[in-house]
Structures are given as C-alpha cells and as structure tokens.
Image (tube, grey):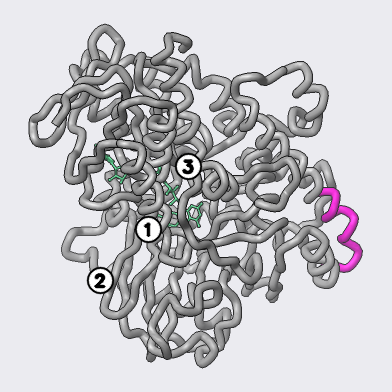
Amino acid sequence: MQNKFDIIVMGSGLGGLCAAFEGLRAGYKVLLLEQHNLPGGYATSFVRGRFEFEPSLHEMPDLRNVESAPSVVSYLLDDAKLKVDLLPIPEAYRVILTDKKIDVSIPFGLDRVVETIEQAVPGSSEVTRNYLNLCREVQQAFQYLNEHQDDLNYKEFLKEQGNFVRTGAATQTEVAKAMNLPKEVQDILYPYWCYLGVPAERMSFSLWAALLDSYITKGAVIPRMRSHEFACAFLDKIYQLGGVVRFNAEVTEIQVAKGTVTGVKLNSGEIIKTSQVISNTSPSNVFTRLIFPKKEVPKAALKNINGRKLGMSLMVVYLGLNMTKEELGLEEYSYFIAPHMDTERLYENISTLESHQIMQASICQNAANPDCSPPGTCIVSITAGYQAEAWDNIAAEDYFDTKQRLAERLIIQFEEATGTNLRPYIEEIEIASPQTYARYTGAFNGVVYGYEPEPWDGIVPRALSMEKENYIKGLQFAGGFSYRAHGYGSSIMSGRAAAHRAKKYLEGRL
Ligand SMILES: Cc1cc2nc3c(=O)[nH]c(=O)nc-3n(C[C@H](O)[C@H](O)[C@H](O)COP(=O)(O)OP(=O)(O)OC[C@H]3O[C@@H](n4cnc5c(N)ncnc54)[C@H](O)[C@@H]3O)c2cc1C
C-alpha cells in the first residue's frame, strides 16, 4: 500500500465518489477511504427476503432537455459518462391534505402544472405561472454560477440576473407574499418543502425556487437498480482511472500541523500522508472528533458549526407487499400526505414522537420501475421527518416498540388518506430511524439533511464565504453538509466543486 497520495477522500457517499472521480480526472493520485464495506453512503440498496429496497432516493430531477441548463443528470451521463439506466417517474406527485379535503395529482411540465392548479383554484393561473417563471430564473442563475466557477463576471451576472439577486436574501414566505400567491396554491405547490426540511417562513427562497423548478418542470428519474447503481457506476470510473479505494477503512484522525493537513490515520492505526483531504463527512464530525491534535481545531470553525442549525433526520418504513400496486389501488408513484400544508406547524411537530399531525412523503417504486419486485408484489416506502432529539428520552428497551408504534401510525395515515389497505399484505417490513442513519453513515446526530439552509445560510452565502471558511489548509468538504446543501444532485455537484478547489490548492492558487 502506498503511503502518500495527492488527495485523500474520506467517505464514499455521492459527494466523496464524485470528488474522487474528478480528482482522478484532473490527473491526481487519489485514495478513497470508506468505513463501510460498500460504497454509496445513502445511495445504496438493501435486501429483505425477496425484496431489494431503495433506502433513500425518491427521485432526481431530469433537466436534460432544458436549453442552457446542464443538469446533474446531464453531468452524470454526458460528462462523467456513468453507465446508469434511468427510468422516468410518471407524475410529479399526488398531494392529499386530509383536514383541507385537498387531493390533487400534479403532472410534470410548467403548463400542465398551471392548468391543474387552475382547475383546483380557479383564477390562479397567471400568478402561478409568474411564480413558476421566477423559480425558473433563479434555477438558471444557479446553473450559470455552476458553469462559470472560474470565469464569473460579477458585474454581468448582477446585471442579467436581477431577480436572482433581489430574492437572494428572501424567504419562501416573503416572495409568496410579495407575489400574492394564494394560500390555496401554496397548499398544492409546497409539499416539496419536506425535501428541504425548513418551513417556508425560514426557507431560503433561492434554494426552494431551484428545487421546485427542477422537480416539476421537466420530470424526474430513478436508477433501475436502486441508487446503488450510481455508487457502482462512480466506483467503476474511479477504478478505470487508476484510483485506489479501500473499504472497512475508517478515518479516525485528520492530522494537521500548523494549520495545514499532513495526512490521515485509519482505525487500523495506519498513517497515510497527503496535503489534501476531502471530507465526505460533516464539518460537525470533523471539527469535534477528527482533527488531530485537538489544539489544531480552529476556534472559528467551532463557532461556525455551533452557529448553524442541524437539519432534520427521517424515519422510513419500507414495505414489501405481496399484492400488486394495481390490486392495492396504488396509482401514483409519489404521495405527499398531511393534515394541512402549514409548514411551520408541521415542522414543529417533528420534534416530538407524539404528534399525529405529521406529514409523510411516500413512494410506490413499482409505478416507475415495474420489475423492481417479484411478480405479484410491490414496494412502498413511507418517509416522515423527525428531529433526532425527539428520540432522546426513549429508553433502549423501548426503542423497537416505539419504532413499531410510529410505523403503524404512518401506515394507517397512508391507508386512510389513499383509501387503501396495506397491512394484511406486508411480507417484509424494515423501519429506519435517526439512529439507523447515524449508525449507517456516521451522520452527526443521525441528521440526513445537512445544515438547515435558511436565507443567511443558503447556497449563495455559503458559496460566497467558502474561501473565508477554509479554516484548515488542505481540507475541503463534499456532500450533504457542504455548500450546496443535502440531496443527490447537490452532494454530487459539491463533490465536483471540492475536487476543483483541491486542484486549485495543489496548484498553489487557493
Ligand atoms: C431516507 C432518505 C431519503 C432521501 N431522499 C432523497 C431524495 O429523494 N432526493 C435527494 O436528492 N436526496 C434524498 N436524500 C438525501 C441524500 O440521500 C443525501 O443528501 C446524499 O445521499 C448525501 O450524500 P453525501 O455525499 O453527503 O454522503 P453520505 O451518503 O452521507 O455518505 C457519507 C459516507 O462517508 C462515510 N464516512 C463517514 N465518516 C467516515 C470516516 N470517518 N471514514 C471513512 N468513511 C466515512 C460513510 O460511511 C458514508 O459512506 C434522502 C436521504 C435519506 C436518508
């Protein structure tokens, strides 16, 4: 085993995999270290009985045919040339708000979304279209920023992207108010808030706009072989480019001298030298646990992580059902179910395990991937947000009962809202909690949503302050806790950006 590399990537989640791949493409000697025995982090799959489950991905926006807007999917297929078989999702989502008697299925495509909302909220088409057009502008500005990381002309950018700049510090609620977006339209358009985990009152509009636009305008996709297919495709490329990958290799120390990275230490005790570490685990993990010696932890870095708010964790109930989706009466792929769409109240309820006023985001895999389970069966997964702290007072001996009680509540909520009956047909069930995620990827506090992207800590401020927050020379971050916030696309693109900064650093330009 060589003991010196140009770049060491710590963690093989999507951010880490992409960073390793891009580091190799730039011609560097790269070592990828993963504590687990397989790659992907949350981008993986697991098997129970005769079912192979997707642990995390609901969908990835597919903007391949948007002019001047190269998307993550285009990057993966056309630039990185990953071998993945992507399947289209049939519709954006069905939103069922039980207290408000709202039940609307939203198709993909701006015109069709406007039309569908007009039918549910007569007279709303103009304002809905204006709102969605603004979201499009914001999304395009992000894509421009992404493509011009090195040659950005700020003056030109500010002149051409006025709306992006004007809404840059605004919340989702502020923009909706300024545009007079009716509450009834918000009820139908807001379900994706749960993918970001911050209520509209505190949500950075830019990030929300980019997400809404990319999800509903052009469709979404999933890989046929679960998200594990992304991880394997990246890994293939890494091997092809001569990268070294080690599994069961947990980094226990990032070694630092005089504020500069010198190497890493593994759980085996082995020390490997490098001047550049890209961490796919969070700054919270790195600055509280991994920097060695402790006196090298910059006070400003601790202040930074303490000042930010950790995002939510999740609970997921994975069901392998011995009936087809047609027999069960499941027509859609994606279901957002809640009593109402008051995001502040829904958010408050995730800090307790007792509330019944919760929102779930559920999918039936077979609606997009008919052969994902054996004939005569289907797979449903039900996801709800919970703060990790909500579990603090659960004694170890009550853990499994508590998980089962909450899972049953979520299944019943799904059945009542959709008029289906799932429980008699459950052949396999697995229930994941924040503890599961903490154990599986080492996520700090079981958080799966990175830091909350409030306006002051949204993508734009994060990108602008990135260089100032480079607390240790030779240390970059990639993944859901870095500047683009969590999510498949964000983690992948943050890996590309981290490799880009690593290159600058190694060339003495950072
Ligand atoms: C249930 C669920 C549903 C989701 N749904 C969606 C969705 O529909 N759409 C979407 O875009 N996003 C979704 N996400 C979020 C998305 O999965 C994550 O944001 C993204 O996968 C995070 O990638 P990452 O690069 O941060 O790495 P992670 O997946 O967090 O992986 C980090 C890797 O680093 C390794 N590691 C950690 N510490 C060390 C160490 N010390 N040494 C070596 N290795 C280490 C871990 O083992 C892990 O492999 C979902 C997440 C969950 C949990």
Q: Which amino acid does label 3 sit on?
A: Ile
Mark 3 or 2 closer to N-term? 2
Label 1 SS? helix
Mark 2 surroundings: few (<14), some (14-19) or many (≥20) residues within 10 A: few
Residue at image location 60% in from the left, 20% down from the top: 150
Of circles 1 and 2, the one toward us is 1
- Residue situated in front as seen by the camera: 149 or 441: 149
Residue 476's quadrant in the figure?
top left
Residues at marks 3 and 1, CA–CA distance in whole angstroms: 14 Å
Secondary element under disc 3, as helix, strand or loop, is helix
Q: Earlier in the sequence, mark 1 or mark 2?
A: 1
Density class for disc 3 (Cα within 10 Å; few <14, some 14-19, many ≥20) is many
Sooner in the amino-acid sequence: mark 3 or mark 1: 1
Q: How crowded is mark 1: few (under 14 residues within 10 Å), some or many (20 or more)?
A: many
Comparing 490 with 84, the one in front is 84
Q: Give the range drawn in magenta.
A: 121-131
**Mark 2 is on which residue type?**
Asp
Task: Residue 289 in the image: state x and y as whole percent.
Answer: 23, 30
Say the numbered circle drawn on residue 436: none
**Magenta stretch containing residue 123, yes or no?**
yes
Which mark, by number, is residue 492? 3
- The vertical placement of 485 against 122, above or below, is above
Question: Of the residues shown, which amino acid type is indicated by label 1?
Answer: His
Q: Which residue position is annotated with label 1?
A: 228
Residue at 18%, 40% (x, y): give it: 249
**CA–CA distance between discs 1 and 2?**
30 Å
Q: Residue at x 22, y 13 (%)?
A: 295
For residue 192, side relative to residue 371 (left or right): right
Q: Which of 345 and 233 is in front in this view?
A: 233
| Spot occupied by residue 466 in the image (x, y as percentages of width and height) | 50, 21
Q: Name the residue under label 2.
A: 401
